[in-house]
Every structure is written in C-alpha cells, then in structure tokens.
Amino acid sequence: MTSTIFDFVGDNSGEWEVTSMTAHKGNPIESVSHLTKVPLGDLSQSEKGIWSFKGIISNLRYTEKEEKDKLTAIQEDLGRKNATLAAFIPIRKSETWWNLAQDERRKIMESKSKHTQTGMKYLPAIARKLFHSRDIGEAFDFLTWFEYAPADAEAFEELLDTLRKTEEWTYVNREIDIRLKKV
C-alpha cells in the first residue's frame, strides 16, 4: 500500500539540501539546511528535526473529471532521476477564502485564476504533488511539492510568477518558498 500521509522534516541533514528559504507572505519559519519527505510509519522519534509539517494526499477538491483525466494523462510522478531540483511551498489561505462556498472557491481558482490550466502548460517537465494539512490542524493549509530538472528551472519560476499574480493568490496570507537540490 502506498502511503498517503507524509511528514516534511527540516533539519541539519536529510535527502534534499536547502538552497534558499523565503517567506513570501507571513512569518518565516526557522532556517534549516536540509529537508526530508518521510512517509507515515518511516518516521522515528529521532527524526522529528528542527521543524516538521504533516500533509495528506487527498482527492482533487477543485478539479472536474475532464481536467483530472488530462492531468493524469500528462503528469509524471515524483522521483524522476533527472529531477534533481525541488521546491517545498507551505501555504495558508485566509479565513475569507475558507468562508466562501466550494463553488465560489472553484470559480476563483479555475474560471478567474485558471489554476489547473496554467499548471498544465508546464507538464510533464514539472512534477507536482499537493498535500492537505488544514483538516488535520497543521499550521499550513497546503504543502506543495514540486520536482524538476535544472533545465526546467526557468519554467518553474515562470509558473510560480504566473500563479502569484492571480486573484486566488490574494487569499494567501502565509507562503514559505523553500528551494532544494537532491543530495
């Protein structure tokens, strides 16, 4: 069985070296030199690190069937050999966002901000996985994990820049951008 619950552990050693940590919105978190993504059950007491965030792989909450089918057809999985760069971006949205109805949030994400359509332009070069954290009482609502090859680093920056200019991003009140390279 594949694990759906993961801990992201920031520490002084680990599988990914931290190359930068930037608080785009809200308070920063404590600086670390490494990060490890650990499936539930593989985390020992001694691996709690300087900080740790937990996330769950869940259903796609704002994606319709046609979009899901397109994503599944072209998105590659994490762990590709040439994807030696990564970004871990914890995000928290405002209470105003969460007070909107599901269809209102969907309208902002897809009709106005074109979140999925924008992301699909960068597939399969940039692999992405979203981990939900809000429902389990974590400090962030979402933990986003991206992996890509060095040749696709400029495209990744373009993707983030495009998303950060959307209406959806006006509801983000905390965002930490942690860049990584495979050790």
Image: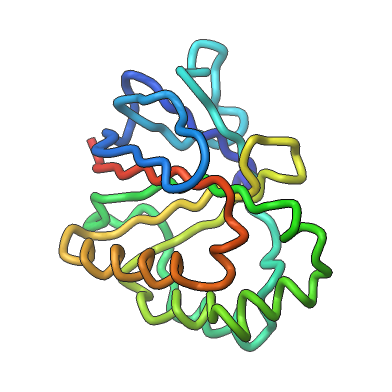
Q: Is residue 11 above or below residue 64?
A: above
Percent x, y for residue 64? 69, 82
Question: Which image quarter: residue 76?
Answer: bottom left
Q: Residue at x 80, y 66 (%)?
A: 100
Q: Is residue 92 left or right of residue 75?
A: right
Percent x, y for residue 55? 62, 42
Q: Residue at x 34, y 27 (%)?
A: 14
Q: Kindly give the residue lying farthest to the top in the view shown.
A: 46
Q: Front-most of 141 and 168?
A: 168
Q: Is residue 65 above or below residue 101?
A: below
Q: Quadrant of the C terminus?
A: top left
Q: Front-most of 175 and 6?
A: 175
Percent x, y for residue 166? 50, 73
Question: Which image quarter: residue 31?
Answer: top left
Q: Is residue 115 above or below residue 88?
A: below
Q: Is residue 45 left or right of residue 98?
A: left
Q: Residue at x 31, y 36 (%)?
A: 16
Q: Residue at x 45, y 33 (%)?
A: 28
Q: Front-most of 60 and 19?
A: 19
